[in-house]
């Protein structure tokens, strides 16, 4: 006898628990307050965000850089909004982030910012590099 099991797609969605502020900071390569300038969905479903750094902690972050997010744990970012992002370093000046990393819209980031002010290590915002011709 053949039995077919039908599972709704939502059952495969990202499931995770938000980390404590300490854990989010410890796991991140850098933490930054970022203003989103551009959001582009690439052909493979990955989203590339261009952001401008307003403040940074833990390690130096470029003034302008790309953040990649996607798959079922995509952290949705909106153009012209400001977010506190817990970042994982990628290639060059690129970073990645996802849900359940501690990320917050600026309107929900007060507790995180207080924690970062008290316990985080402020870092430099690196000036934009001139484009190579």
Image (cartoon, rainbow, N blue to C red):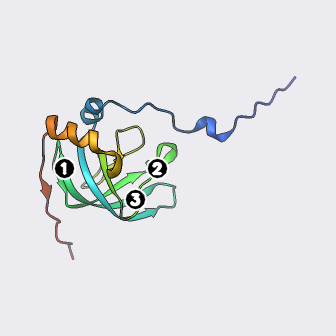
Q: State left or right for residue 108 relative to residue 40.
A: left
Q: State left or right for residue 132 relative to residue 21.
A: left
Q: Quadrant of residue 10?
A: top right
Between the C-alphas of marks 2 and 1, the distance is: 23 Å
Q: Return the x and y of residue 126 as percentages of the image width and height.
A: 14, 58
Label 1 belongs to which residue? 56
Between the C-alphas of marks 2 and 3, the distance is: 9 Å
Tag 2's secondary structure?
Answer: loop
Label 2 belongs to which residue? 70
Comparing labels 1 and 3, the label whose residue is closer to the camera: 1
* Contact flag, marks 1 and 3 (Cβ < 8 Å): no
Disc 3 crowd rating (10 Å Cα; few below 14, some 14-19, many 20+) is many
Q: Return the x and y of residue 113 as percentages of the image width and height.
A: 23, 43
Tag 1's secondary structure?
Answer: strand
Instruction: Quarter of the image for the N terminus: give it.
Output: top right
Q: Specify which label sits upstream in the sequence, 2 or 1.
A: 1
In the image, farthest residue toward the top: 1
Disc 1 crowd rating (10 Å Cα; few below 14, some 14-19, many 20+) is many
At horizontal 43% and vertical 30% (from top left) the residue drawn is: 17
Disc 2 crowd rating (10 Å Cα; few below 14, some 14-19, many 20+) is some
Q: State left or right for residue 34 relative to residue 98.
A: left
Q: Return the x and y of residue 91 as percentages of the image width and height.
A: 28, 51
Q: Is residue 37 above or below residue 106?
A: below
In the image, farthest residue toward the bottom: 133
At horizontal 48% and vertical 43% (from top left) the residue drawn is: 73
Label 3 belongs to which residue? 48
Q: Specify which label sits upstream in the sequence, 2 or 3.
A: 3
Tag 3's secondary structure?
Answer: strand
Comparing labels 2 and 1, the label whose residue is closer to the camera: 1
Between the C-alphas of marks 1 and 3, the distance is: 20 Å
Numbered badge on residue 119: none
How many labels were placed on the picture?
Answer: 3
């Amino acid at each position: 006898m053949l039995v077919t099991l039908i599972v709704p797609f939502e059952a495969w969605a990202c499931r995770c628990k938000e980390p404590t502020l300490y854990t989010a900071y410890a796991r991140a390569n850098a933490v930054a307050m970022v203003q989103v300038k551009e959001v582009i969905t690439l052909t493979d479903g990955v989203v590339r965000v261009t952001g401008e750094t307003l403040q940074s902690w833990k390690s130096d972050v470029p003034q302008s850089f790309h953040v990649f997010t996607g798959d079922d744990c995509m952290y949705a970012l909106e153009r012209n909004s400001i977010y506190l992002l817990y970042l994982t370093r990628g290639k060059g000046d690129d970073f990645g982030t996802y849900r359940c990393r501690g990320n917050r819209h600026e309107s929900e980031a007060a507790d995180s910012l207080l924690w970062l002010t008290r316990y985080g290590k402020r870092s430099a915002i690196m000036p934009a590099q001139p484009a190579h011709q």
